[in-house]
Amino acid sequence: MSSSQASWWPLTVAALTFITLVGCDVPTGNSSPSINTDTEISTPLVQEKTFTFLGGPNSEFDPLIDTTSSDFDSLFEVESSNNDISVVQEIDNFDIGNLNEALDNATGSLTFDQKTFDETFIDLQKEGFTFAGERQIGVLNVELQRSATANIPVRGSNRVAFKKSQNNYVELGPTTIEVQNITSSPTAPGGVFDSLRFTYPDIRVEPYGEDNQLVVDFVENPCGSGPCGSNGEYERDISGDGFRIDLEGARIYPDKPNIDENGTVTFKIGGQVNPDLTVKDDDKISFGASTSFKNFKIREIDVDQAKPFAVDITPNENGGDINVANDNEVRTAAFDGFGGITDRVDGLKLADVSLTFQVETGNLASTDAQVYAAIQGTNETNQIYLRGTEDQNMSRGADRNVSSLPFSAAFTENGVSLQNESLIKLGVGLEEAALGETVRTPLLVDGDNSNVADFVNTLPTEVRLAGQAELNTDGGGLQVRKPIALDANFSLNVPLRIRDRFVVRDTIDADLSDLNDLTDPEEDVNISTAELQFSYTNGLPLGADVKMVIVDAAGSVIEPRFNRDFDNDNFRIEPAAKDKDGAAAAPSSGTFVFTLGSTQEALRALAEGDKIRLAFNMDQAGSGGGSEAAARLRADDQLTLNRVRLEADASIQTGN
């Protein structure tokens, strides 16, 4: 450096230093610098979550409906070959039981009168005998083998008719026939008759052939109490004054061809007069007795005609109107599979619903039965009646509507009469049935002849049945035998086709604590974006509007709620395209975004979020593929949330 440079350099440095100091403010107060920082949060909350429509805790993917809970395993049935789902429910425990009163109602007060018999077998004077003193009748030219016929009146029934040509009959329960007050004259030490025979040609014992008539012989040495004669006759001591015989299982073949007229049952008395009997010429050889049925019980009938008659198929305490609300007058059963379904699903509506109502009868033949019923489905909040209608399928003609009731009893609910429109009629033809066999008649109840879709879609957990039946509606022939059985069961087995919207709920884990980075009150935060981003692939033939709430670790909902009423179409999962049968053919994919807020206050509470609760309002709107078929679901149909991500962008200014 030259000497001249050395002299001016310190002066120059001093001057520059002074100028710099003069150009700066001297700081006072807070001396921290002011800093703006751009902050971005991008947190994957769920990398991928796949739902199948049905499944359980051991399923590979989380099910929308857990078939192992709420007895759903008894509600859904999966076809192993194609994973098609059917909704299956059965009620087979109405336990209606016996209808033995039907026999009494059919026959009315049918009974057989007591018949008193007093017959003169021989009148010596009328037969022209005149002689002095006494003679043995055997020396007279008189026929000693005599008989007479009498009829027992059949009374008390204007409900049934029997034709002998048809071999119509009444089969007896524990009934006895009695003959008593046997008298004969004149009296004689050796007896008036050597033998007597009571023959009832209209009463037959097994095997009920014409040769199996009830015959009772009075002899000196009877063989026993049962039918022990050479041809199956009963034998009784001729010195006795009557007999009593158990006729359980025997059949009476009345002569009663017209319903409104009384009939008869014939019996004959025959005997051999003792030839050693001493008589006078004015004597009359006579015989008297009375015959009757005691404890008369019917267990089977086969009639040519029977007027239509009603029978209770559920208890009727007072014999009057039937109260559906009275537990003592109904039969109840459960739709077990619907119990608790609302814990996970709201508003599930099935399409193409039908019930098979199977009526089971036993020992009713050559007849028909029309069941008139009030069938009420109930759950915790609703009740509905299964109502029959005229069949819209005219070729089938399976009408279920009740235009009027053929009996005097009405159906009521706590004193209020039920309209016929709330009832259903189920007809059973038994013309080809045979006694001794159980007949199961399936009756289809579907959308063409009932409100079955509304009934089932109420998801009843209990079904109450009250009913009466009218039998033999055509007034023709009838066969009935005790015990008479009638029972009924429902079976529901339909493909799981969705008719309308329904809501499915699910909860996913989601730690939102990263939002704390944006909520420090000491920082001035300008939030440009804070949102939850969802991307999906949907293999269900159903779309869904989505709503969301965020809950903290204690399970409390953090406000605000997002798309509270499903009223924003932006939060939408589009359905898979459907094939012609309504099953998913090709998946859809897309994204939707929930905006969380733009202020620290809005995000501060959400930062406590621990879980996200989603509700999917499932429907068929917008499904592609050109199919108008109702959505048909398969067990392995899947909805995948490919990604759930927390995204936020903000500018944070610290200091001044």
Image (spheres, rainbow, N blue to C red):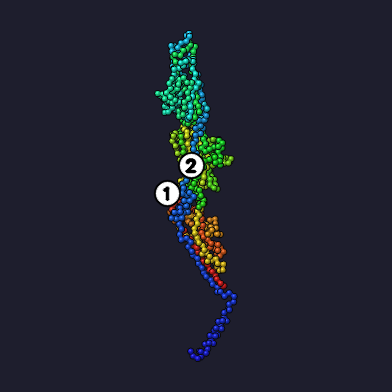
Q: Which mark is residue 93?
A: 2
Q: Secondary structure at mark 2?
A: loop
Q: Is residue 539 visible?
A: no
Give the x, y percent position of residue 632: 45, 50
Depth check, mark 1 against mark 2: the one in front is 2
Q: Is residue 604 visible?
A: yes
> Which residue is painted at 55% across and 70% down in the image?
653
> Which residue is painted at 59% across and 75% down in the image?
29
- Considering every residue shown, the one lying at the far top of the view is 132
Q: Secondary structure at mark 1?
A: loop
- The number of callouts visible is 2
Question: Eyeballing the image, is 220 above or below 565?
Answer: above
Other residues around mark 1 within 10 Å, as few (<14) / some (14–19) / many (≥20): few
Give the x, y percent position of residue 181: 50, 21
- Identity of the amino acid at label 2? Asn
- Considering every residue shown, the one lying at the far bottom of the view is 3
- Identity of the amino acid at label 1? Glu
Question: Eyeballing the image, is 481 above or below 122?
Answer: below
Give the x, y percent position of residue 94: 49, 41
> Which residue is painted at 55% across and 83% down in the image?
17
Q: Earlier in the sequence, mark 1 or mark 2?
A: 1
Other residues around mark 2 within 10 Å, as few (<14) / some (14–19) / many (≥20): some
Q: 385 or 129: nearer the eye?
A: 129
Residue designated by label 1:
79
